[in-house]
């Protein structure tokens, strides 16, 4: 099997790369699991927050907003930050970072009656938080890629990568794939892919994030509630199809693996959530975990490796993969095609793998 571009990884990073690169040449996407988006992309909190992340990430967020809207994957949600008296310093730092407006705690309780008025000392609100239909976005990218001639392989875990003339050969259960350019979009496994290819790893760290889906405590109707974040990002809760997704917001380092929720960490996060509410969590409907993979500077890595220009990084999405996907995909294609990127030069340089050289 031959291709111009072999993309390793079928999460949102690989899917949007396939959609953008397919018009530029023959694409083969190799996904290790039985379905695309099985790992981090299938376990996302599914929210768009323009002010979330470092300034470089925020630039990608804003550059992605218009395409998200055009694809019809966004829905209004809103964001509310809450804190106790002892959380004041963390609350004010978070409110400033997320560009939220402080509101009277009584106003917050009126909007979210689950909040305990005797414990809620601070609240801030913003309208920018939006739900992302992550499955619709992932599948639309894959449809675009296939329509442009890309081939999407599942159950095709890459076992070895070798140089072959002016390109690469990857060994998979689907056979050997020869390609002129290799795109590393392997999520938590990106450094492992680099090692297989003989390219210097950049020091990515997968970090576990546990989540639970629970009935709304107290029997409230949460459909119109905003996403709730505890000051210091010590927990969050987000309405989800008549229930709530609650997370302890942990970022514990983990090996690349099929992650699972840490019961102790999850229980601690649920307790922090319950400490701000009038009713306890009665039971869990489901729990899971995903790996958010960060570069050392917590900024995405997009573009050619300085020592191997035919090895492209599309990595380090962390917790920003879906919300940055449109702009990240466009940047990768612009770099491949030799076009002037739509992003400003400082942002492009801040995303480039060469920053680690």
Image: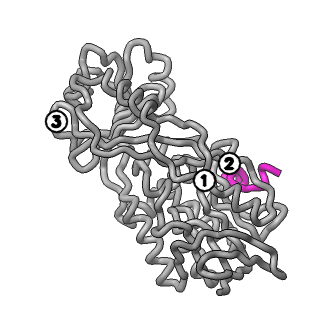
The residue where tag 3 is placed is 220
Where residue 188 is drawn, which disc sits there? 1
Q: Residue at x 26, y 24 (%)?
A: 277
Residue 135 on image: x %, y %: 38, 63
The quadrant where residue 333 appears: bottom right
**Residue 264 magenta:** no
User: In this image, 318 relative to 214: left or right?
Assistant: right
Inter-mark Cα distance, 1 to 2: 8 Å
Query: What's the mark number on residue 204?
Result: 2
Q: Residues within 10 Å of mark 1 (few under 14, many from 20)?
A: many
| Nearer to us: label 1 or label 3 | 1
Query: Measured along the vertical axis of the image, is residue 193 above or below residue 107?
Result: below
Q: Residue at x 52, y 60 (%)?
A: 325
Q: For the residue labelled by badge 1, is the local secondary structure a helix, a strand or a loop?
A: helix
Q: Position of residue 164 (x, y in %)?
A: 81, 80
Extent of the magenta region: 346-357
Mark 3 element type: loop
* Quarter of the figure that contains the N terminus: bottom right
Q: Earlier in the sequence, mark 3 or mark 2?
A: 2
Mark 3: few/some/many CA within 10 Å (<14, 14-19, 20+): few
């Amino acid at each position: 099997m031959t291709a111009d571009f072999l993309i390793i990884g079928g999460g949102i990073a690989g899917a949007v790369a396939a959609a953008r690169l397919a018009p530029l040449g023959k694409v083969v996407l190799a996904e290790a699991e039985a379905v695309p988006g099985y790992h981090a992309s299938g376990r996302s909190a599914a929210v768009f927050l323009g002010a979330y992340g470092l300034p470089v990430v925020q630039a990608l967020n804003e550059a992605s907003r218009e395409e998200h809207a055009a694809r019809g994957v966004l829905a209004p949600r809103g964001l509310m930050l809450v804190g106790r008296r002892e959380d004041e310093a963390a609350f004010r730092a978070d409110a400033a970072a997320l560009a939220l407006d402080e509101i009277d705690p009584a106003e917050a309780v009126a909007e979210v009656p689950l909040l305990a008025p005797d414990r809620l000392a601070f609240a801030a609100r913003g309208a920018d938080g939006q739900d992302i239909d992550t499955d619709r976005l992932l599948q639309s990218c894959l449809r675009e890629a296939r329509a442009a001639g890309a081939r999407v392989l599942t159950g095709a875990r890459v076992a070895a990568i070798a140089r072959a003339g002016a390109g690469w050969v990857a060994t998979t259960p689907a056979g050997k794939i020869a390609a002129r350019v290799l795109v590393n979009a392997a999520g938590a496994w990106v450094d492992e892919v680099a090692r297989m290819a003989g390219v210097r790893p950049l020091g990515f760290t997968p970090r576990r994030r546990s989540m639970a889906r629970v009935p709304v405590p107290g029997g409230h109707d949460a459909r119109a509630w905003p996403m709730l974040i505890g000051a210091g990002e010590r927990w969050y809760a987000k309405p989800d199809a008549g229930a709530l997704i609650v997370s302890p917001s942990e970022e514990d380092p983990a090996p690349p693996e099929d992650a699972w929720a840490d019961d102790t960490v999850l229980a601690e996060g649920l307790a922090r959530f319950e400490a701000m509410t009038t009713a306890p969590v009665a039971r869990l409907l489901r729990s899971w975990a995903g790996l958010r993979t960060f570069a050392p500077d917590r900024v995405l890595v997009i573009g050619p490796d300085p020592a191997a220009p035919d090895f492209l990084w599309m990595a380090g999405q962390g917790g920003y993969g879906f919300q940055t996907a449109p702009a990240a995909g466009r940047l990768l294609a612009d770099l491949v095609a030799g076009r002037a990127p739509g992003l400003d030069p400082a942002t492009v340089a801040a995303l480039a793998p060469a920053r680690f050289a």
